[in-house]
């Protein structure tokens, strides 16, 4: 039998705020054996991260407290340890990879300084020894040209590179236990596959245990030996991963396993009227050097792309980070400068200034990736949704309020929600509010920029159903930008695959997913659907 490394017994976590008590975690218990992987699975708010943060006592004490429980690591109860003892454990015997590396890495420190700091504090290494070890770690986690990256700052790295740096920091002292909190959320499917493969290899080489926190059941199937399913602060089911997947017992587990975007996109209609089209569109950003800031080269974010979006149809745009997907969307919205014709309902708008574009804004809308960042925290939901109506003018106070209520009901929210603020809603609810804001002006064309990337699987499925329903009712044209190919397959009837600012493949959705032609498209599909490329195309496993 595998020796137990960590044992959590009857753990409860309460939060006290303004006289109210929230029971975030209720009598949770599980064990992790040496070298094994245990997954905590559940939707946002289920208590996964609070449970993990309790292990190292990283919660905001004293507002957080433990009415009951023990966290026994190598025979010692960490909840009874003082800060001095915990500092010897944190980052040394137990390390943690946080969900969002951009907020976890210090923007003012270089990569060398941030990774080296751990080695100097815990191992007392000199600058020279720490530098050598940092280079070794960056090589180990697959950072290309690590010497060139030592003096880079977090904002100069891609999402996948930042996550690799976080892994390097977590593994610097060869911990016995690694806690990985949503380590691949919002990463491209190919980068996600690389990160998961890397974690498995490092775990095998170092013999460390892993506590994996995620809402993505596909990751759990690949990574975990044992799975614990959480909801509303409780573990409702746990067992060997294969058993839980093949023979789920609890209704909530069955709900999670069934929660994938389903249904079919609208039938492709080449005769439908074209809403927006462009031909040979280019967006080049100049690279300037020297004292006089002369242009020495260009970043070709969008390089000669032609697309058509039709009424009642969805054009899916897929590709990795940096492929130019969002830049293409912003150019079509006339939010950034571009070169090439952009035609809206038969009229060219590429030369239109902001005054000429203003009347068209009600017809051309956008839903951004992160609703928490795109919704003003200082405005109520009613103010957020009616802002566009105020700008466009022509409606009375009563008419605007009625339209706000209608928009909220259309996205499945209660009208009373309009008196609340964004922080009072879940991620899925905030995305519904962002969609309501876009739909309140009754648009004809909507750009959807990764609207489901950071949402739980069941919430993703709800948003996909909602978008499909709204499109059908209003005959909308969508440009749907995503790296999640499962969502694209459920929404888009036509697809373009982008890489390095160019289209590498395009065509009807069914053709792209069933018989991809390029190696790049096959690689994307293999990462997303666990399919195997063959001489005859791709075959599902």
Image (cartoon, grey):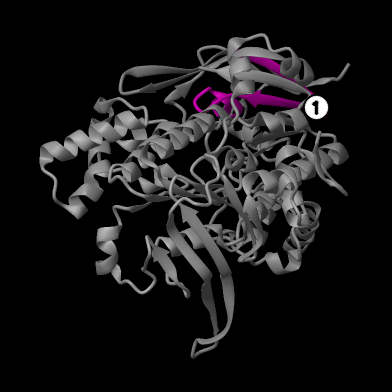
The answer to which image quadrant residue 111 occupies is: bottom right
- From the image, tell me which residue sits under label 1: 36
Q: Is residue 420 visible?
A: no
Q: Residue at x 54, y 23 (%)?
A: 47
Task: Magenta stretch: give its range.
Answer: 28-52
265 sits to left or right of 342: right
Residue 522 pos. (x, y %): 76, 50
Relative to residue 382, is residue 393 depicted above or below? below
300 or 19: nearer the viewer:
300
Instruction: Bin the neighbour count of mark 1 within 10 Å (Cα to Cα): few under 14, some 14-19, many 20 and up.
Output: many
Q: Residue at x 72, y 51 (%)?
A: 119
Residue 39 pos. (x, y %): 69, 26
401 sits to left or right of 141: left
Q: Residue at x 72, y 62 (%)?
A: 127
Quarter occupied by the N terminus: top right
Q: Secondary structure at mark 1?
A: loop
Relative to residue 428, is residue 152 depicted above or below? below
Q: Residue at x 55, y 38 (%)?
A: 265
């Amino acid at each position: 039998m595998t020796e137990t490394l960590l044992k959590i017994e009857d753990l409860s976590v309460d939060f006290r705020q303004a006289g109210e008590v929230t029971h975030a975690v209720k009598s949770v218990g599980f064990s992790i054996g040496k070298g094994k992987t245990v997954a905590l699975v559940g939707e946002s708010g289920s208590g996964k991260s609070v449970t993990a943060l309790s292990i190292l006592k990283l919660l905001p004490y004293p507002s957080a407290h433990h009415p009951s429980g023990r966290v026994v690591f190598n025979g010692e109860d960490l909840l009874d340890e003082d800060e001095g003892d915990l500092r010897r454990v944190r980052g040394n015997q137990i390390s943690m990879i946080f969900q969002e590396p951009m907020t976890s890495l210090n923007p003012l420190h270089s990569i060398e300084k941030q990774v080296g700091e751990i080695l100097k504090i815990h191992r007392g290494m000199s600058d020279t020894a720490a530098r050598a070890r940092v280079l070794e770690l960056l090589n180990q986690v697959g950072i290309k040209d690590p010497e060139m990256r030592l003096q880079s700052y977090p904002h100069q790295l891609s999402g996948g590179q930042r996550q690799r740096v976080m892994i390097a920091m977590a593994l610097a002292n060869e911990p016995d236990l690694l806690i990985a909190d949503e380590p691949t959320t919002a990463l491209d499917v190919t980068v996600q596959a690389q990160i998961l493969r890397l974690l498995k290899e490092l775990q095998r080489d170092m013999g460390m245990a892993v506590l994996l926190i995620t809402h993505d059941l596909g990751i759990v199937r690949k990574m975990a030996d044992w799975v614990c399913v959480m909801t509303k602060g409780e573990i409702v089911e746990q067992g060997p991963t294969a058993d839980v997947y093949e023979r789920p017992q609890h209704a909530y587990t069955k709900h999670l396993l069934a929660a994938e975007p389903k249904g079919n996109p609208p039938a492709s209609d080449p005769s439908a009227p074209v809403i927006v089209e462009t031909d040979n569109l280019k967006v080049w950003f100049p690279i300037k050097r020297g004292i006089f800031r002369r242009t020495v080269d260009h970043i070709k974010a969008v390089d000669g792309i032609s697309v058509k979006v039709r009424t009642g149809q969805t054009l899916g745009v897929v590709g990795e980070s940096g492929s130019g997907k969002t830049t293409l969307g912003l150019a079509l919205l006339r939010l950034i400068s571009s070169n090439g014709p952009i035609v809206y309902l038969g009229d060219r708008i590429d030369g239109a200034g902001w005054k000429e574009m203003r009347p068209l804004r009600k017809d051309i809308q956008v839903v951004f990736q992160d609703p928490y960042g795109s919704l003003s925290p200082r405005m109520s939901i009613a103010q957020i949704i009616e802002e566009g109506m105020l700008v466009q003018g022509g409606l009375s106070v009563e008419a605007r309020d009625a339209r706000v209520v209608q928009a909220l009901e259309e996205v499945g929210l209660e009208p009373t929600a309009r008196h609340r603020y964004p922080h009072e809603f879940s991620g899925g609810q905030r995305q519904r509010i962002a969609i309501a804001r876009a739909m309140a002006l009754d648009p004809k064309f909507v750009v959807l920029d990764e609207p489901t990337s950071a949402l739980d699987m069941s919430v993703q499925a709800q948003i996909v159903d909602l978008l499909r329903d709204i499109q059908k009712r209003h005959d909308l044209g969508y440009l749907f930008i995503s790296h999640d190919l499962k969502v694209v397959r459920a929404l888009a009837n036509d697809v373009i695959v982008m890489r390095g600012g160019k289209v590498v493949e395009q065509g009807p959705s069914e053709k792209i997913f069933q018989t991809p032609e390029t190696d790049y498209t096959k690689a994307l599909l293999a990462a997303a659907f666990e399919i195997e490329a063959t001489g005859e195309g791709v075959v599902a496993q």
